[in-house]
Image: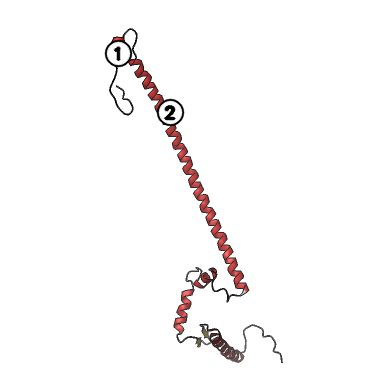
Amino acid sequence: MVRGKIEMKRIENATSRQVTFSKRRSGLLKKAHELSVLCDAQIALIIFSQSGRLFEYSSTSDMDQLLERYRQYVADDGRINNIGEFQLMGQGLSSCSFDELVGIENQLVSSLQNIRLKKAQLYREHIEQLQNKEKDLLLENAKLTEMCVQRKKSEEQWGKQRGATLSPSPSNQSSVLVETELFIGLPEWR
């Protein structure tokens, strides 16, 4: 005898709905117990009926301990939870289905692409900073070069003027004074 496929929609008859809830709840609790025993899994199952009645199952003696453990794994503000992070590190993948693995792979590819874009952006910004610094250094170098050229010209002019006043003339050779004072640095105008 083959059972027909049940259409997944709300059962309109209240009595039938209550009977189905009771049978399926019992089956779900039984499956949860079997899974915890056979696979040594820690399971917490919470069911609220339509009337608000609570049905629960915990594979350990302390339901609160399992709930607290669950809270630790769930991110409060949308960040990747610890389970996802654990899987992204390549651990705990043996229990994942093919579709979950494809999803994790897509997450990794997307994250890698974002990291590469951010890295390229940082490199571009750093290159721009270095180019701006190079321009500033070239301008400063040009200014310093100009200052050196001007200083050499002024030293040459000073030397010519100084040489003209101190050079002996044929008519006045006896009145030529020779400066013998030693000093370090640029000459002073006297």
Say what secondary structure mark 2 lies in. Answer: helix
Residue 13: quarter of image:
bottom right
Q: Nearer the viewer, mark 2 or mark 1?
A: 1
Q: Position of residue 88 (x, y in %)?
A: 54, 68
Crowding around mark 2 (Cα neighbors within 10 Å: few <14, some 14 to 19, many 20+) is few
Q: Position of residue 45 (x, y in %)?
A: 52, 84
Q: Is residue 177 left or right of residue 61?
A: left
Say what secondary structure mark 1 lies in. Answer: loop
Quarter of the figure that contains the C terminus: top left
Q: CA distance from mark 2 to mark 1?
A: 32 Å
Q: Closer to the camera, 65 or 148? A: 148
Q: Position of residue 173 (x, y in %)?
A: 31, 10
Amino acid bearing label 1: Val
Q: Looking at this view, name the residue that lies furthest to the right.
A: 1
The type of colouring in the image is secondary structure
Per the image, the residue denoted by label 1 is: 176
Is 96 rendered above or below residue 112?
Answer: below
Per the image, the residue denoted by label 2 is: 149
Residue at 40% x, 26% y: name it: 152
Quarter of the figure that contains the N terminus: bottom right
Residue at 48% x, 40% y: name it: 135
Is 69 rendered above or below residue 119?
Answer: below
Amino acid bearing label 2: Val
